Image: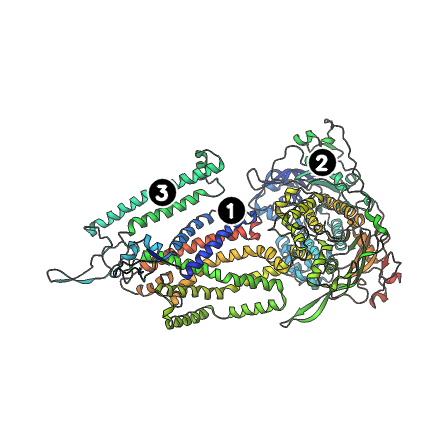
Amino acid sequence: MKQPLLKLDKLSVRIGTGPRAIRPVDDVSFTINKGETYALLGESGCGKSMTALSIMRLLPQPHGQISAGQISLEGTDLTALPEVEMRQVRGRRIAMIFQEPMTSLNPVLTIGNQIGEMLRQHQQVKGSQARNRVLELLDAVGIPDVRRRYSEYPHQLSGGMKQRVMIAIALAGEPDLLIADEPTTALDVTIQAQVLDLLRQLQRDTHMAILLITHDLGIVAGMADHVAVMYAGQLVEEASRDRFFADARHPYSQRLFESLPNIGKRDHALKTIPGFVPVLDRDFTGCHFAERCDQAWDYCRTQAPAWDITTDHHHVRCHLEDRNINPPARTVKEEAATPHAAVASETGTSLLSVRDLKVHFPIQKGVFKRTVGQVYAVDGVSLDIPAGHTQALVGESGCGKTTVGKGILQLIRPTAGSVQFDNSELTRLSGKRLRRRRTDFQFIFQDPYSSMNPRMRVGDIVEEGMIAQVIGNNRQERRARVNELFAQVGLSTEHASRYPHEFSGGQRQRICIARALAVNPRLIICDEPTSALDISVQAQILNLLKQLQNELGLSYLFITHNLSVVSYLADRVAVMYLGRIVEEGPVASVLENPLHPYTRALLSAVPQIEPDTQREIIRLEGDIPSPANPPGGCHFHPRCPSAMPGCRESYPAESGDAGHRVRCFLYN
Amino acid sequence: MILPVILWTDALIFLLVAIVTVFALYARGKPHLRAPWRHVMCSRLGSPALVVLSAYVFIGLLDSLHYRPALENSDDSAQTHYAVEVLSVLDTLVGPLRTQTEKTYSAPFATHLYSRETVRHPDGSQTREYPRLEYGGRHLENPAADARADILQRSSVALMQALVASLAVLLLITLWQARRRRQVFTSTLQDILALRTTVPWLIFWITLSVLLLLTFLAINLSTVYHVFGTDKVGQDVFYQTLKSIRTGLIIGTLTTLVMLPFAIFLGILAGYARGWIDDVIQYIYTTLNSIPGVLLIAAAILMLQVYMANHPELFETTLERADIRLLFLCIILGITSWTGLCRLLRGEALKLREAEYIQAATAFGVRHSKIISRHILPNVMHIVLITVVLDFSGLVLAEAVLSYVGVGVDPTTNSWGNMINSARLEMAREPVVWWSLLSAFLFMFTLVLAANLFSDAVRDAFDPRLRQR
């Protein structure tokens, strides 16, 4: 058997000293062969990035250190290498790309300069030779017009382009191993598909190995040869991709699959993993996953399972897989099916009716703030949401979907158009009358970390809206209501006297939901409420939202870029592109039979778990244009695979039947 | 009988003390406010700096309790008359230091004057010699031979006293900690000495011991010697330096008290309201910033001087006159220095108004005034605090510079700036008179250093970017 490229042997990392030291990586062993893609899958806080950093020996200094184990790169032990030699390994043998392309490039150096620096460092190429090589590299990562881009600065590039430049920098050293730490998490789905394609193609051409760190099962399914699942600092399962997706053995992996929302699970509550990833600042007795595992028994809590339980190269760190241990008989709890809220669909009157909503932001310049242009963030959006329904609004970042939500709530005053809520015109309300009306509609923000005042107790945060809306006559009544709300969203009442930073992301989002419910709203606008959360926590929140809808008859406007969430939760979906809705209709109809080319491209770009599905893959070229200067005619024509000459002339009118509308000349 | 005198600056100082006390009581109940202060206490540079600062503040506060002593009734009338001179508690405590004035310059620990004088002997002959001091080393029979031994002996007494006192302090700290941690005395002591406690009590104790030693040395020596010499009119320099502490502290703290309302109100208003309000406030502070600060201060102080000269009836005592000038200096310094903080707060408020929790509050229909007081103000307080502490040392130094230029505090007010200003001429003398400058420098340096170390610790504790580690 040939020597593996990279071999980790019982690697353990500690950050800090003493009994409270963080143990982000604990007894991790795996091997990566030349030319293969090895995926490290797990939720945030499980130690994936720390594993990658310890391979590069870039652990946070001075606190982080490799406390045990070996990392060998083709036989050389990296943990024993002096720093001088390690510098030769970094970039040259192992390169790394990071999640955030916006901050990984130096803003004051040109692109060409930054790639050239790597060449000088590792290949000793200089002058015009180096310049040619840089142009080659930029070309290889699919950047158009390389000669112009060579002398541009990072801020002149879009997110996807920056990530391509990062890849070019990584490639400059011609590494044997590329560590990609969540390379596409910050990117939109269509751009993500481009970058993943690029990585696949580069791997074919250069035969480098890729260590892909991600939390997205879909990406793993499309990219990896081998999959390792990481939980609380340990690998819990490792197998080849096909085997893993066909037969995941560890309870954690199984739960991850089950907590993914999709259209088939609409009528049921999602299976969730209770609780959240533990803080890794203590020694565990027993299995790390035991406290969240529904199959755990006493033995799991006292005895740590071993890693070497193997069948056919399929490692599972679980007592259930050990033939020498007999688990007690399992009592399977069936979760109650929650009927989908669409039963309320008989009510024909709409609660919220948005007509031709426009939000333009003026671009001002000079001393006298002359308006020199407009950003057409939202440019004519019409929506109807009946009571008790969920309308999803889908689109990539920058298409104006959040602005629609804020425009409806009058957090941003619309430039034109009408917003009718329960037959009153919100755009004409102001001052005190608008403030009184705000009790009917609420907002849940994307980031549960920044949407609560860090200097207030969560009880006061929830109470604040009630005070403003004069709900409850005195403090006792309001407190009672807060406790009621906390119970409703699944928190205990003693949490009310704590501060936001003491909660995990999922708990914070629950508090935000409780806060929104406090004023008895009828419509809640959810702006990507789960995108900052891990998969298992996302399932908890989606279940909660669905349950609340059933109990209280709430309407949701669900703003998201995650189509699987849409398919699970929404009744109708609207797809936005550059400030306009291009397609709108019932979920099943839009997702299964998309009409607009953009919707089709969006759907095909989403990484799918089932690798065997035969689907036509449409790759969009380029990025979303700026809404300050949208292309003439149909906004989508420069990227559209089926653009016709007429598309350049004018924006298509709405067509299709009342149930499923689309704005495209293909259907006119 | 005494007549309490409350000067303007005294009132403001005690107002400030009250504000700080109220804030401290309020912060006790709020973990997010208590935590950073604990962090300051636990820092190994912050806690000794705090001890030193407290010593300064203590002296400053003692010097801020003013009164006028009653005069001996000479004409048997029922009405008591009070002295024109306003004294402070500190003056009474250091008694002899204030009253024991020599004729002119004398060096530290000297027993003779620094300059030769013509002395007429009883037998009619005249000699030029260095005469004995009236008070310094008066108890010595033979100063040339005994002075050194006497100083050593007194110092060793002070050392013994300091040792006893510091051991007593250590005992108290340990007993208190042992009670709190429910540990035995010896293990607590070991923890403290090995720096295993969260608050570095060892460093605390060492700083306190050094301060105690200095205090006992001062008590034992300054009553019979002029430890820092005397100045041109024979006043004890050590006494002057002690009195200067109050001036320094007032300039450093009252100025911020004056500028804070401007800076906080205008800064947050500009950032939160935006639009034309923001433009107006920005233009105001940009304009104010473009006027040279010293020029503005000089103009204001000169105008005040003219006004005070024309209205002598407004001021009962010279100290009140000097006090008004000091207060006015604080105000004018405050007016010229609020712009920096205002700019910072405007930026922060601009950022915060877009924060999601502010938008959430807007979505609940919370009023603007509530949003500002409940959401924005508490979230910019760390910036205010860091700026105030950082500015303090700068202002103390600014006073020295302004007094040197001649537009600072009243010449009769004891201040380091005035001491340095007069030392300017003394440095040109032959032989040189160096002690005024040195003692002003030593006291100012210690205060500014402690303030800077303290402000570093405060910034480390409050700056959210530094806290994330």
Label 3, residues with CA under 10 Å away: few <14, some 14-19, many ≥20: some
- Give the structural element (helix, strand or loop) at label 1: helix
In the rendered image of this protein, does residue A158 appear above or below residue A502?
below
Residue type at the position of mark 3: Ala
Q: Chain of mark 2?
A: A
The quarter of the rendered structure image containing the C terminus of chain A is bottom right
Residue A295 % position (x, y): 73, 33
**Mark number displayed over residue B383:** none
Residue type at the position of mark 1: Arg
Q: Is residue B155 visible?
A: yes
Quarter of the figure with residue A504? top right
Label 1, residues with CA under 10 Å away: few <14, some 14-19, many ≥20: few
The quarter of the rendered structure image containing the N terminus of chain A is top right
Residue of label 2: A293
| Mark positioned earlier in the residue sequence (3 or 1) | 1
Cα–Cα span, label 2 and label 1: 39 Å
- Give the structural element (helix, strand or loop) at label 3: helix
Residue B26 % position (x, y): 53, 50
Residue of label 1: B38
Query: Does the residue at mark 3 contact the one at mark 2 (Cβ under 8 Å)?
Result: no
Residue A287 % position (x, y): 67, 34
- What is the image's colouring? rainbow
Residue type at the position of mark 2: Cys
Cα–Cα span, label 3 and label 2: 61 Å
Q: Residue furthest front?
A: B78
Cα–Cα span, label 3 and label 1: 27 Å
Q: Nearer the viewer, residue A149 or B286?
A: B286
**Mark number displayed over residue B165:** 3
